[in-house]
Image: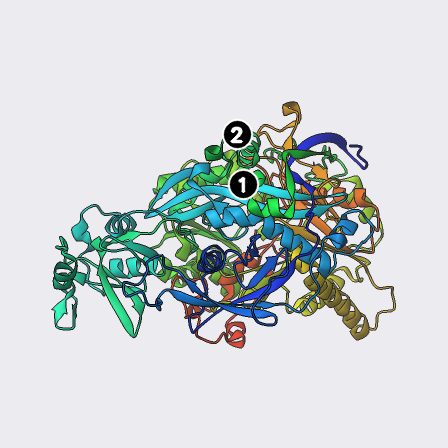
Amino acid sequence: MSTRGRGVPQQVLTNSFVISKLPTRTRYFQYEAISGGGRDVKNPRRRIEVFERLQNHTDPKLFTPRCIFDGTVIMYSSRELPLSGRDSQTFDVNMSDKPRVDGSAPTRGVLQVTLKKVAADPIDFNGLQAFIDGKQTKQTAQVLTAINVLQLIIRQAPNLKYPNNTRAFFTKDAGIQTLGGGLELWRGYFQSVRPTIGKVLVNVDVSTAVMFKQDSFEGAALAVLKQRDVRALELRADSPQFRQLKSFFKGVSVTLVHRPGLKKIRGLVAGAGNFQFENTTVKDYFKKAWGRELHYPNIIGIQVGSKDRDEVIPAEMCVIAPDQRYTRKLPPEFSPTMVKFSSKNPQERLELISAGINNSVTADQRSALDYQNSPFLQDAGITVSPEPISVTGRVLPTPKIYYGNPANSRPVQPRNGSWNVIDQTFHEPKSLSSWGILNYSRVSDQTINRFINTLLNSCKKLDLAPPAASQSCSGASSVVNDMRSLKNSVNNKIGRDLEMVLAILPTSSTDIYHAIKSFGDVIAGFPTQCVRENKIERANDQYCANLGMKINAKLGGVNSLPKSGALEKLTSAPLVHPAPGADVGHPAPGMVNQPSVASLVYSFDRYAARYEAMMSVQHPRQEKIDELRKLVYRAIYEFGERNRQAPVRIIFFRDGLSEGEYALTGKEEIEDITGAIDDIWRDKHLKDGKPELTFIVVGKRHHVRFFPKNKNEADRSGNCPAGFVADQGVGNPAVRDFYLQSHGGLLGTSRPSHYITLRDDIYKHNTDDLQELAFTLCHAYARATRSVSIPAPIVCARGAFHFNPAMGFDAATISSNDDAFDLERWRKNFKDKHANLSKKMNFM
């Protein structure tokens, strides 16, 4: 394949496979599948089981060939179903294979499912074919629906066979790792259908799921508590361990030892064998009804059923059911194991993908994806090539990094995406003479003194004076008093206000860190720098030099300037151009009734090296930035006040939008930005021309990967070198997009960032300059001596520091789903950063 554009060509393999044959059945009919009879099934996996039972047992003749189901309410059939009603039919689906002894019709275990034909034209693939052939330039609703049907056809067979999250499925055969705490890791495969010019691809990637380990309930409970003796489960209902187990097991399904059945845990019961009901106890009931003598009547048991029909089952009669995903936030202690299991170098990752997609000779050794034998692919007449596609990309020129005065200093040339700051002089160093230390750790004074001496020696370029005061502290509850006490000590000693606090923290200290950042960012208005005790114990010149970079940026200094032809071209005009970036941070999995926090940063200097940050609060998990118009107005106003002139160009990098949000959310946010420009031009009576706008979505939540064909063209980690860009062979026909791997490889297979240009007044069709600019800005992250994955720093993760602690933001115990979300209450309890930190990058 030929290539065009700036940089050195490089051939790579991708984890994309060509759908070599689109469906030969040209039309699919759409139906709604509604469960009824007062027993609506909400769990997607259970709905799939009901739907499969409907097709395979209730009326297999009607459902030949097999229909595909999306796990919620939509079903597609490659023929129009002859339903008994005009366009609908209700089926009684018996979920049990056990016949009634008296021969009567079963009642329990029977679910009603109503199929209703959707009043819409049948779905065909003509529009999709025209789209990839370039005869149709817009990704219309018809094209999106055809892609969705293809996606369901591809995913249906493995999703019926294996536990899944609809986008990826997981199987022990692909790899398993015990995690501890009643959990284990399973490897699996992600699949996504993606159109590109001239063809449709299946993107296949390795994925990882946390699963509940199949084990006896007692074994799982002891693993959670890190205990071995079953008597450790003799717990009071008010004990912390009981509450811990109740939270961990809520909603988990168990099978039963004494009889067939699958039950979902609603709660726990202390001393379950002695629990009384109907003039007997659970222990006596199991002995009389099931001939089972309980060995441990005093340990916990489970509650199942509804509140009005409660059932208590002893722990020793329960087994954790197989194939259950753990969907809550993973405890931090397991993160290293998760990272190690998930991280595979490029060669290993591609081998795992190939093992999943390549068809085997014998039926009992079929690959996990098994495209060749899927009845859904066979019925549709679809074939998938087992060979990954090859594309030709380019390695962009690496920008030079300037320290000190660029006019009389030699630039640093990054290698493999990194460079060294030792012996370099900051471009704009700040002095620090009034600061102090808070020590929350157990390290000795001798260790702290050695660390401070190394820091002072490494930060001569920063003009860093010795600390004016130091004090030992206890914990999070005393942080506010500690900070105020240190402030007074420094002031009394040298007669100056406190400029910065350096806090030494224990290795695990989230609560202390939160309290320190909250006080410094919001209440007091001075920068804070936290270091972990395990870091300072082995601190060297390199570590302290990197620490000095963070401190200088927080004080308002500039460490270095990246330079490239594309950036020089942008900044050659007499006016300075801000490069904003925006993102939305959402509550952690399992968190309810907590807001999302949107952030916007904008550069206010010539080389996009210094950024100002602002945040806003909005409804949970809403991706569109509600107050973007207000934030952009403020950014342009502050930029104008500082530079005494309005911007002439705005390059806006938007992080976090998914492909389905480009058309609507992207369009609305572009309107918000242009609306803010109109507002400020009107309010300030500006006569100059309004700034040109380039709006680029930077996506990281994708599974496209690149694998060097030639090992000699890979970096030390086996990845493509920093600066590899691909804009042919894997792009979307509807948008101008490219993939840029801007950082050097470290652990595993690097994830490139996906750049999608939704509006481009500045570059128009000059993709070369835009690609080089994005790569250059990835070298402008003030706290790093490595290029990073996206151009603009993101600060929404700091939202927790700005809420009133009484709100319990990001806490483990939160309101129920039934409570109404009160956005105004959250906004009233949110404070912006202190005015003293304006134009200082406290978020570094």
Element marked by disc 2: loop
Write the residue at 77% across / 38% down. Answer: 407
Q: Is residue 772 left or right of residue 210?
A: right
Q: Is residue 326 above or below residue 538?
A: below
Return the mark for residue 361.
2
Type of amino acid under label 2: Val
Q: Is residue 267 left or right of residue 336?
A: left
In the figure, residue 272 lies in which quadrant? bottom left
Q: Is residue 657 left or right of residue 282?
A: right
Report, in whole angstroms, how far the alpha carbon at label 1 lies from the one at label 2.
Answer: 14 Å
Colour pattern of the rendering: rainbow
Q: Is residue 243 left or right of residue 814?
A: left
Q: Is residue 384 above or below residue 98?
A: above
Type of amino acid under label 1: Leu
Name the spot of residue 95 as percent of width and height, x first: 39, 60
Name the spot of residue 786 as percent of width and height, x first: 61, 39
Name the spot of residue 412 as percent of width and height, x first: 68, 33
Question: Residue 817 or 334: which is nearer the viewer?
Answer: 817
Mark 1 neighbour class, 10 Å CA radius: few under 14, some 14 to 19, many 20 or more: many
Question: Which sits earlier in the primary sequence, circle 1 or circle 2?
Answer: 2
Q: Is residue 291 above or below residue 405?
A: below
Write the residue at 79% across / 59% down. Answer: 647
Q: Does the image show residue 614? A: no
Name the spot of residue 779 as percent of width and height, x first: 67, 42
Q: Which residue is mark 1?
A: 369
State if disc 2 and disc 1 touch (CB < 8 Å): no
Number of the front mark, 1 or 2: 2
